[in-house]
Amino acid sequence: MVSSSQLLLAADSMLSPTLVQALVKIVILIGGLMTAAAYFVLLERRMAAWIQDRRGPNRVGIPLTGIRLFGLGQPLADGVKFIFKEAYTPSHVDRWMYLLAPISILVAALVVFAVIPIGGMLPAVAGLSDGGEPISLVVIPGFDSGLLLVFALSEIAVYGVLLGGWASNNKYSFLGGLRSSAQLIAYELPLGLAILGVVLATGSMNLERVISRQAESGLWFALAQPLGFVVFVIAAFAESARVPFDLPECEQELVGGYHTEYSGIKLLLFLVAEFLHMITASFLIVILFLGGWHFWGLTGGAGAEVGWLQSLLRVAVLLGKVVLVILFFMLTRWSWPRFRFDQLMALAWKIMLPLGIANFVVVAALGEIRAWYDPEFVDRYWEWGLALPNWLSLVLGWLAVAYSGTLVTDNRPQPGPQVAATRGEVF
Amino acid sequence: MLPDNPKIRWVDEPQLGISGRMYLPMFAQGLATTFKHLKRSLAGDVATVSYPDQEPKIDAPLIYRGVHRLNRDEQGRVKCVACFLCATACPAHCIDIIGVESPWPDREKYPQSFTIDELRCIYCGMCEEACPVDAIELTSLYNLTGRSREEMIFDKEKLLSVYDATRESEPMRTASIGGTNG
């Protein structure tokens, strides 16, 4: 039998600095992400209003005081509204799946952040760091298959969408879910191919390593592999189902897509998960292609020992870049019209997939050539010199897409023998 | 419809040029439009009127369709001749008139009671169009509120008082804008 003192001892040893550190990071991350998602919703609404010559939500401030604060109380009001709404479940739905869908999509969207670094290292803090080690600003430090985890979890988001669409027992929801799964699976391929280039160049799937690699060379992967960058950004837009790829939930065609039958807190979970997908996509764009926390002449190289100022600067640079990318997401929403579904699929399979493969082949071949002449990978000139053929591949690939005209589709029924044969049955 | 139906005229889409197929000019065009509006809004030039703080500007009060009024003639009597044309024209059936014999020599009838249910009214302005003597008119008062349904049923006195309140700012229809008044 285990005595209570033994249990206490066990509990004491379990609360090692590593664990405390992880718990603190998780709390900060989840709190921060939820708040960020809420305020990004407000920002998106304000941006939408500005672009449409309106003012946007600018009234809600501190309750009962009449202080408006430019509408900064709006997310709180929205949240309270969603939470206190009746938790209505339509009678025709599959109850368990209906409940499971929003939970699974939100959990998957949140867990991704376990491997996404939000900065570089922090100097050691007493009580938190194990033996004076600097604190890594990622929940699971040194996780070598981080990118794989991100991909696996972003695939689970498809389950949430499909489950929601299926469980709703509504044809619009079901169509939305189907479209969404087809879209997400189609764009997963170019996304993966674009990442392969980065993984090849880095030699690791650890996201911290990807950043430090770019910091060492000072050449962001967006500059070194522009074709991969373009493919990744477009695929990331499609993966996070943002305009012009918002077919899963296009209001004009599908009412609300897979979350038509949801209301109250469950709808809120879906909406938050969608925003988290966008934030994840922005983080990935910044970390993989825009240098993460690195900025020339500001944040120092990868090897340097960092002080408090430097490390906080790195966090600020990373988050600043992420906010800029999110702003781009929001501007995009009001600039371009949505794709038709066949155009979406044509773009994925006929354009993005070949471009992704081309990028991968070019990067791999150039890497081999470099390994031939510079086996130690030390020569800085190779790094910058190889960017040139990569830019060439972007221009050539883009021109090839334009000249082949694969996006130009003609789906009208063509007169022909098959149609004529069925003449009697068509009417 | 069969595709080889001779009545179908096939229209070919205009061919995209190489710049169109490169997508970049359109990309830039879309962003440029977005930024144009963003810049304008951030400079404060928005279409929204912050209503309770700021009154909306009504461009043409004479043709705005707000609360009704019953006009008076030069001697201060109600102009209405109780012809029921407005009540007949009203698609919402919100006008209720009781016409009796007129005490004045210049007309046969006048309204003993004239009520409009402002909650039923759809503010289409057909009563105003139907009126042969320009007695009923819609004013530019738009912020009509009340605490009960009964309060929102306007009787003759109330409608005349709306005229008294708006006679300065909104003159009666003249012939120049389609009225019968001199």
Image (cartoon, coloured by chain):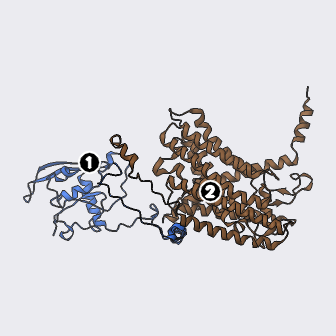
Chain colours: A brown, B blue
Element assignment for label 1: loop
Residue B69 in percent (x, y) is at 25, 58
Question: Which residue was labeled with disc 1?
Answer: B92
Q: Which residue lies furthest to the front in this view?
A: A417
Question: Which residue was labeled with disc 2?
Answer: A353
Residue A226 in percent (x, y) is at 67, 66
Q: Residues within 10 Å of mark 1 (few under 14, many from 20)?
A: some
If the image is split into quadrants, where does the C terminus of chain A sit? top left
Rounded to the nearest angstrom, the CA distance separating label 2 from label 1 is 61 Å
Q: Which chain carries label 2?
A: A
**Same subunit under labels 2 and 1?**
no
**Can residue A198 be seen by looking at this rendering?**
yes
The three-letter amino acid code for the residue at tag 1 is Ala
User: B107 or A356, which lies in front?
Assistant: A356
Q: Which chain carries label 1?
A: B
The three-letter amino acid code for the residue at tag 2 is Leu
User: B175 or A112, which lies in front?
Assistant: A112
Mark nearest the camera among 2 and 1 is 2
Q: Residue at x 92, y 29 (%)?
A: A3
Quarter of the view holding residue A13: top right
Quarter of the view holding residue A352: bottom right
Q: Residue at x 42, y 66 (%)?
A: B14
Residue B172 in percent (x, y) is at 22, 66
Q: How crowded is mark 2: few (under 14 residues within 10 Å), some or many (20 or more)?
A: many
Element assignment for label 2: helix
